[in-house]
Image (cartoon, rainbow, N blue to C red):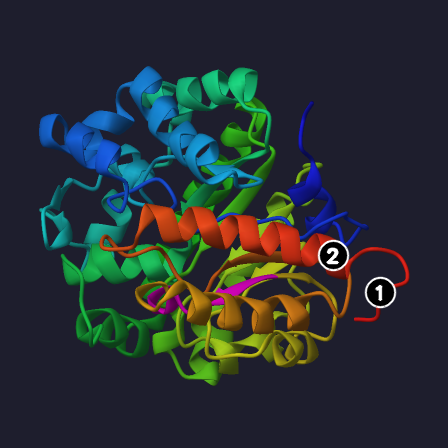
Amino acid sequence: MFNDRFLRACRRQSVDRVPVWYMRQAGRYDPEYRKIKEKYSLLEICRQPELAAEVTMMPVRKLGVDAAILYSDIMNPVSSIGIDFDIVKDVGPVIHNPVRNAADVEKLSPIDVEGDLPHVLETIRILASELDVPLISFGGAPFTLASYIVEGRPSKSYMNTKALMYGEPAVWHKLMGKLSDMAAEYLRAHVRAGAKAVQLFDSWAGSLAPHDFAEFVLPHVESIFARLADLDVPKIYFPGVGSGELLPHLANLEADVVGLDWRVPISEGRRRTGGKFAVQGNLDPYVLTAPQRVIREHARRVLDEGMKEPGFIFNLGHGLFPDASLDKLRELTEYAHEYSEQRLKPGVSR
């Protein structure tokens, strides 16, 4: 039977227990995945649909989660618009032709998903036919992608990115518009191929002051979701780490779910977003370094907060780290299911 618990929670419908999935749930914490990575790079795996589908399904089988998330990288689609990059071990995305001025922006071409990224679509088709849980596909949000494309590699200061944003706002908005077009077309193609939900990752938007987010970033995020509004799948926005002060600006977003990082209590996240969205999150990933008893205490606190209202998906407040324990994750998933099922029984006070 198809498990639609995650989809129901996204739509703030009743569930028998809280659905669970984890950001970066297909990754380096899994010894089997590490063996695959000894033979293939991330991008090489992505280019082999059967292998990428297998890696996507591994955590579903091993952890018992209620959704799969496509094995991919937010940088994948930028190759189609003219960005030359590699994923370098222990560094991250390294851009060989950074975008720093108006001429660089003009060179960027529209995305051709079918022509340049058929392997991604084929992976989704395989998964759509084999999974018994929903497949979440994802894309990078414009600011987060720009932070790599402009800087040339991961950054903690985003100095070049902010210099372009503040110093040449017209060029900045042109770049963001092109990245928005790319993200919307990319995710729409994923849904056509069989994805059951989409998530937009804005991992580094929390580095912005709220007024800068509202002026330079939010209109482009809203544009993406507006262009996906006709698709009958849940749409998730994750504004990234440190984004609690940005939440009040999301009221007009045509999304169904907002992901929260661990710095914002679930109830406060709901208040700041006007109670409009289902919420997803938000256990601190590094709680997984603790003994199982401590993990359960923290998970119970998140679950109790989340279950106060319909529309809650248990997740982490950011992605899994490489040293996380597969056994602890499996036990956490079982605990979240069992505890929430007991608490959601009719007649049980929440």
Judging depth in this view, the residue of 28 and 94 nearest the camera is 28
Residue occupying the point 20% across, 77% down: 157
- Residue at numbered disc 2: 342
Judging depth in this view, the residue of 326 and 237 nearest the camera is 326
Give how far across and how far down residue 192 sits, in percent: 57, 24
Q: Is residue 338 left or right of residue 142?
A: right
Q: Are marks 1 and 2 in contact (CB under 8 Å)?
A: yes
Please tell me in which quadrant of the rendered image residue 56 appears.
top left
- Residue at numbered disc 1: 348
Can residue 223 be seen in this snapshot? no
Up-down relation of residue 10 to residue 86 (above or below)? below
For the C terminus, the image quarter is: bottom right
Can residue 280 be seen in this snapshot? yes
For the N terminus, the image quarter is: top right
Instruction: Say whether residue 279 is magenta.
Output: no
Give how far across and how far down residue 8 sits, in percent: 74, 44
Residue occupying the point 51% across, 42% down: 184
Q: Residues within 10 Å of mark 1 (few under 14, many from 20)?
A: few
Span highlighted in magenta in the image: 280-287
Q: Residues within 10 Å of mark 2 (few under 14, many from 20)?
A: few
Give how far across and how far down residue 319 sits, in percent: 36, 56
Judging depth in this view, the residue of 287 and 131 nearest the camera is 287
Give how far across and how far down residue 146 sits, in percent: 29, 58
Q: CA distance from mark 1 to mark 2?
A: 8 Å
Ranked by sequence position, the earlier of labels 1 and 2 is 2
Q: Secondary structure at mark 1?
A: loop
Mark 1: amino acid: Val
Residue occupying the point 33% across, 25% down: 52
Give me the disc on residue 53: none
Judging depth in this view, the residue of 338 and 241 nearest the camera is 338
Mark 2: amino acid: Gln
